[in-house]
Image (tube, rainbow, N blue to C red):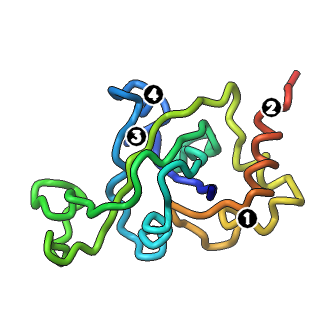
Amino acid sequence: MNYWLMKSEPDAFSITDLKSRPKRSEHWDGVRNYQARNFMRAMKKGDLAFFYHSSCETPGVYGIIEVARAAYPDHTAWDPENRHYDPKSTPERPLWFMVDVRFKRELEKPVTLTAIKMQSSLKQMRLVQRGSRLSVMPVTAKEWNTILKLAEEKFP
């Protein structure tokens, strides 16, 4: 099993939105960065990911999701009415891919970006590297376990 971190702006799509979907699942579309796309293509059904809220008052890990379907062509790229449209992508030669994700659990208290940056054991995590703005990235087993431990900490 592999671990991932998937970012979304909560105003666009949040962990609560995913939780409220039928079957608590949804496709993760709109990724338009080649490196993030390649990470999505490496995802396997059953992999786990942190659901990270970005571009908000308190960025951080808000939940855990599971890859419910491995990568397949992102059809939103072919729809001129869709905000993710890309005329260079076609059904015959898709450029962009998406995965289906399923809600696993919401964290009682998010693990904030600030808390993550304070952990010396997470200094090498892609999320905190200067200039890293990817919306999909791998997470090592050590990073995964460290963030889970932070999520279980009790705060006064």
Mark 4 neighbour class, 10 Å CA radius: few under 14, some 14 to 19, many 20 or more: some
Q: Which residue type does callout 1 highlight?
A: Met
Number of dots carrying numbers: 4
SS assignment at label 4: helix
- Real-space Cα separation, disc 3 to disc 4, in angstroms: 11 Å
Q: Quadrant of residue 12?
A: top left
Q: Position of residue 13 (x, y in %)?
A: 40, 40
Q: Earlier along the polypeptide chain: callout 1 or callout 2?
A: 1
Q: Can you tell which mark lies on residue 125?
A: 1
- Real-space Cα separation, disc 3 to disc 2, in angstroms: 24 Å
Q: Earlier along the polypeptide chain: callout 2 or callout 4?
A: 4
Q: Can you tell which mark lies on residue 13?
A: 3
> Closer to the camera: disc 1 or disc 4?
4
Mark 3 neighbour class, 10 Å CA radius: few under 14, some 14 to 19, many 20 or more: few
For label 2, the residue is 152
Q: Which residue type does callout 2 highlight?
A: Glu
- Real-space Cα separation, disc 1 to disc 3, in angstroms: 24 Å
Name the residue rendered at 79%, 55% in the picture: 117
Name the residue rendered at 60%, 46% in the picture: 50
Residue 12 falls left or right of residue 91: right
Q: Is residue 130 above or below residue 47?
A: below
Check contact, mark 1 vs mark 2: CB within 8 A: no
SS assignment at label 1: loop
For label 4, the residue is 19
